[in-house]
Amino acid sequence: MDKTCDCLCIGLIVADLLVRPVNSNIFSIDTSIADEIKLMPGGDAINEAIVMARLGAKVGLAGKVGRDPFGQIALNQAAENRVNVKNVKIDATTKTAVSIVLINEKGERNFVFCPGNNDVFTINDIDLSMIKQTKIVNIGSIFGMPLLDRGGIETIFKIAHEHNVITTADVTHDVTKLGFEGITNILKVTDIFMPSLIEAAYLTKETKPEKMADALLRSGVKTVVIKLGDKGCYIKSAGETHNIAAYPTKVVDTTGAGDNFVAGFLTGVLKGWDLERCGMLANATGALCVQNMGATTSVKSFDQVLNYMEKQEF
């Protein structure tokens, strides 16, 4: 059947309150002055959906928000960026997740997070008929939705494979301590898995990207893409390996860099690009992201990213 959607992003929808700059002595003084405070949509799934839509993809979003101002802000922003939000569940009995993002002078950030609806988001909140209508099903992120982690994601990916849909996933901090063994059922039905270096090290207990990728491939993942931050990315599948350097960039705020990376990589996949070129596009979207405050501030269009790539020199 013809696909009506390029990518269905399932997962975290958050309202981000970003504060910059914040230094380590914030609790030792009565009042701190910030240069910027912004309220923006955040969370892996919505960030990835918005950036992919700006890059030209037809994107759907599935998640859960409360019937509150934070949820409305997130959904409005997604809809304004041509993301289909009809599959986002609005639940008046719980609240939208909120994250306070404290950004230091180097652009590094720490979070104060209230998970809200993400903790009660289940497979029953998703219209599973949407899966067969898309080219990619992307989970943003494993470990972020405890009730979906336990069987729900595996079911979604199995349905996807029945309809020749590519399955992809990011991962976040393992708050509920599921560990590697707790997600092997998900990984064995994951086509593209995109952890950060820290996340891959946590899962595999290895210290080198090559060994991390090997361990994840043995679990059943088809392609492993490890985000290396300012070092770029490491990609490995059964037949090829790529170590792709990052683009040099000025760092203002690293919030959402990984989500922008994922959006760039999946856009390359949709275009039929090879893994190396997908990694280069992902590095570029990540590099653009960190130049401004907020996860969805910098990347505006596919042409913008291509022009940025053409101008860079290593």
Image: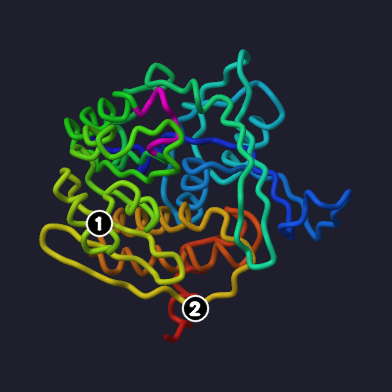
Quadrant location of residue 231? bottom left
Identify the residue at horizontal 42%, vertical 45% (top origin): 58
Q: Is residue 277 left or right of residue 255?
A: left
Outermost residue, left side: 239
Residues in magenta, as a range: 142-149
Residue, disc 1:
212
Q: Which amino acid does label 2 sit on?
A: Pro
Check residue 263 in the rendering and tell me which mark sits there, or answer none.
none
Against 207, residue 246 (above or below) is below
Is disc 2 in contact with disc 1, using a CB cutoff of under 8 Å? no
Residue, disc 2:
248
Q: Is residue 49 left or right of residue 109?
A: left
The percent coordinates of residue 55 (x first, y second) are 46, 57
| Quadrant containing the C terminus in the rendered view | bottom left
Identify the residue at horizontal 78%, vertical 57% (top origin): 36
Badge 1 marks a residue whose secondary structure is helix
Against 266, residue 148 (above or below) is above
Q: Which amino acid does label 1 sit on?
A: Met
Badge 2 marks a residue whose secondary structure is loop
Quadrant location of residue 283? bottom left
Q: Badge 2: how crowded within 10 Å, few (<14), some, or many (20+)?
A: some
The percent coordinates of residue 158 (x first, y second) are 21, 30
